Image (spheres, rainbow, N blue to C red):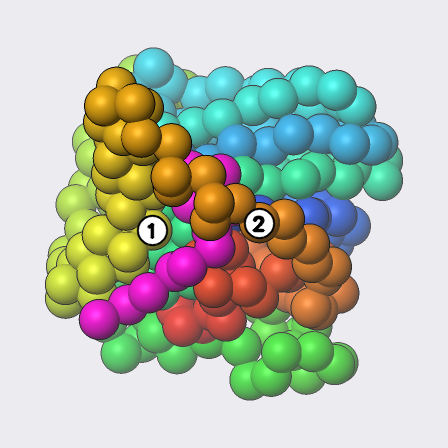
Amino acid sequence: MVSLPHPLPGAVGLSHLNAYPWEAADGVCGGSPHLHLVCTEAYVVTGGEGAVQTLSPDGYRDIPLRAGSVAWFAPGTVHRMVQGGDLRVTVLMQNSGLPEAGDAVFTFPPDVLADPERYAARAALPARSGPEAEAAARRRRDLAVEGYLPLREALLAGDNGPYLAFQRAAARLVRHRVPRWRELWRAGALAAAERTGAQLDALEAGDPAYLAESRAFDAGPSRRGGFGMCGLREEYELPGTTLAHQGE
């Protein structure tokens, strides 16, 4: 049974990203386009400027990012962080632990998505840091952009077929992970909501005894310069915050 005793508010995930400066095939510098299946993600921009490119049923959007702006995207939205100049964001992720357990699928070309073993090999990094990991992260980003550009072109032309096909392929790839995700959700986001319900019941009954359990917690990054999907990542490997990535 998974236990997340002291999660962040709402059992959200937290990390910091500095968008990749690497130029892609279309001349744009930035991260690896991908989507999440069950998690809403938010960018809180803390410095620099850039954009997030999104693909959704509404079509293609290029959302400017600058210090103080916030952008978020629901499950199924393909998103690509674009570097415009020292772009730095704090990432808030719904259902902490699920993205690290594989709730993120790159926009690799269809032939890669159709082969789970090939997809896993292309999505994996050989190490957590160092030149070899950086080279693999760049190859992974380039492959994701290769699959992303045709999806974007089709949406711009009014054809959502390739985008919907990608969503279906992504769902097939992660289906086997759902039991593990359900465990993490029950221990994290669901448990946090249920605690609030229990506290409301106690207050309504005139019994604030649960307040005796109050505590303060603090933490710093446990790893800096990790290779995330969108950029160099500062991680907080706390129970229920940013677990070691199991999908890479």
Left or right: residue 231 compared with residue 38: right
Q: List the residue tagged with mark 2.
A: 215
The type of residue carrying mark 2 is Arg
Q: List the residue tagged with mark 1.
A: 188
179 in magenta: no
Left or right: residue 176 compared with residue 58: left
Identify which residue, 8 or 232, lies in the foreground. 8
Magenta span:
1-12
Q: Which residue is drawn at 47% across and 55% down?
A: 6
The type of residue carrying mark 1 is Gly
Quadrant where the image shows the C terminus = bottom left
Dot label at residue 223: none
Identify which residue, 128 or 235, lies in the foreground. 235
Question: Gap in Å between the C-alphas at discs 1 and 2?
Answer: 18 Å
Left or right: residue 156 compared with residue 133: left
* SS at circle 1: helix
